Structure formats: structure tokens, C-alpha cells
Image (cartoon, grey):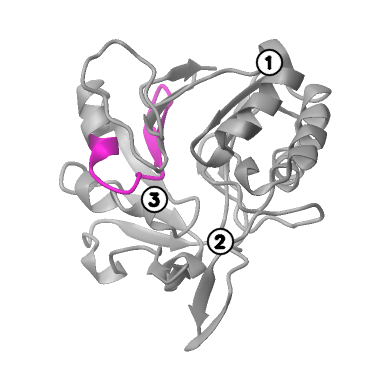
Amino acid sequence: MTKITILCDNRTLLLRPKRLLAEWGFSAMIETNKEAILFDTGQSDVALYNALTLRLPLNKVTSIVFSHGHYDHTGGAMDFLRVITPEKLYLHPDAWLPRYYEGSYIGIVFTKEMLPDEVEIIEHREPIEVAKGIFALGEIPRKHKDATLGTIIRDGKRQDDKIIDDQSLAIKTKEGIALLLGCCHSGLRNTIEYAEEVVGDEVKFILGGTHLIALKDNEVRETAEWLKKKVEFVAPTHCTGWKAEQILASVLKEKLNVIGAGSKIDF
């Protein structure tokens, strides 16, 4: 059994436990029988606070995986590292580069040197199995529309940020791939197709930030129609956008699931 718990999202939905918090950002914990993985850490200590409030077994965490190097997906890492010492941190090498959006810094707010010596930093561009049956996808080929923003400083020069470090987690289940998204800047269809290529199975479940907020209404509807024929379960969070969620709901109907901080999904 694999369990995914949403630790940080733009909203909370649960009446119990009390006092769960929300913020602009994303974090999730994936638990297997043997270990747990943190996928992103939100922008502050909210994800850790929620994990403690939910009484999750943080002592099982062996790895942290960053979906990309934006503050709202990495900012809570140092808070977690005061409580746990995972063996490994997985991320794309570009995740460390300075990034800006509309004049504001939006990159990682700490350096490699600030991490505990016990944490092995694994920078990767190719897919990598971070736990049995769980794959961090690395750089995702982009045949279809993506969702990029801002600028990045590379070799001392500012350039448009293609966010090539964006990756997702593909989790093998008996019913197909469960695809856990951070922000999906690579584009939803690109990410789904690449996950299927890497794992060798079909994506049937989608959770996390889809960044459909960046698409026009007709593009969202086209994506939703494509998803309707393909997947069984879609649970959008974070950067999907309320209008895009309405369109998804109108097309996907019962396949669309509303989740938020504190939500738990078992596979």
C-alpha cells in the first residue's frame, strides 16, 4: 500500500484535526510500508506544522525530492531538517540558480552549504528511482504546451526561465501510475506521456499542481477532454486555478476530486 498525504496547499478542507494551515505552495508525503518521501516542502514551516498536527511518522522519511527550485516548493526544507535528517535530497542541478518574477526573487532561499553534512545531495537530469516503484522523472521532454514564467540567472546572464528543472513523481501501483505533480511547469500532457515512457505503464491517477492557471479556457477544456478518455482520478491542487478547476469539474465530473492540506489518498 502507498499513501499520499498533502502537507501544504493553498487550501484546507478538513474539519479534523483542528488548526491545519494553508499557504501558497505545495508539499506531500508519500508513505510505503518501509519508508516515506517528502515531495516538496512548501514555502514556510506550514508543511511541517501540518505533518506534526496530522501525527505523521516523520521518522520514516528517507528522502526529500524537489519538483523545482521555486521558493513555494522548497522554502520549508530547513524547518523539516531541524526535525528529521533524511539520507538524500534529489533535485535538478538548475534548481539552485537564482530566479525572479516581476522583480521579486522566487528561487531557493538557502544554499547547499547550509544543509546538514549527513544529507547526500543527488543532482539529476535523468529519471531516477528514489524508492522502490517511485521515480523522480528529471527533465521532461516538451512536445506540447508548457507553463513557464520569470527569469533565471545562468552564467551571470539573465534569461527567460524555461524551468527545465521541473519534475514530478511517478508511482507504480497495481492499477497504473499515480502521478504526483509539484507545479507541472513542463506541461501536464508532456509530464503524463513521459511518465508512461519511463515507467512502462499508463497514468491513471493525477494529484498535485497542474499549472493550468497559465492556460486559456479553451486550452484547459481541450486538456480536460483528453484526460477524460485517459485517467480515472484527478485531484488538482496549488497552481491549478479556480477557473481551471471549474472547467475540469464540468468535463471530468466524478473523476474530479477536491483535495487540500490534510487530504490522504491510498493506493
Q: Is residue 28 above or below residue 125?
A: above
In front here: 191 or 220? 220
The answer to whether residue 134 is visible is no
Q: Residue at x 62, y 28 (%)?
A: 245
Task: Count how many numbered circles sit on residues in the image.
Answer: 3
Percent coordinates x, y for residue 60 in the rendering: 29, 31
- Mark 3 — residue? 72
In front here: 47 or 178? 47
Q: Which of the two discs, 3 and 2, labels the residue nearer the N terminus?
A: 3
Crowdedness of circle 2 by 10 Å Cα count: few (<14), some, many (20+)?
A: many
Label 1 to label 2, Cα distance in Å?
29 Å
> Of the residues tagged 1 and 2, which is closer to the observer?
1
- Mark 2 — residue? 165
> Of the residues tagged 3 and 2, which is closer to the observer?
3
Type of amino acid under label 3: Asp
Q: Is residue 16 left or right of residue 216?
A: left
Q: Secondary structure at mark 2?
A: loop
Label 3 to label 2, Cα distance in Å?
15 Å
In front here: 118 or 213? 213
Type of amino acid under label 1: Lys
The answer to whether residue 102 is visible is yes
Q: Is residue 6 left or right of residue 150?
A: left
Please, which residue is most extreme toward the bottom here? 156
Percent coordinates x, y for residue 35 in the rendering: 37, 31
Find residue 58 and report its image quarter: top left
Please, which residue is most extreme toward the left here? 82
- Mark 1 — residue? 255
Q: Residue at x 38, y 46 (%)?
A: 64
Type of amino acid under label 2: Asp
Percent coordinates x, y for residue 263 in the rendering: 41, 20
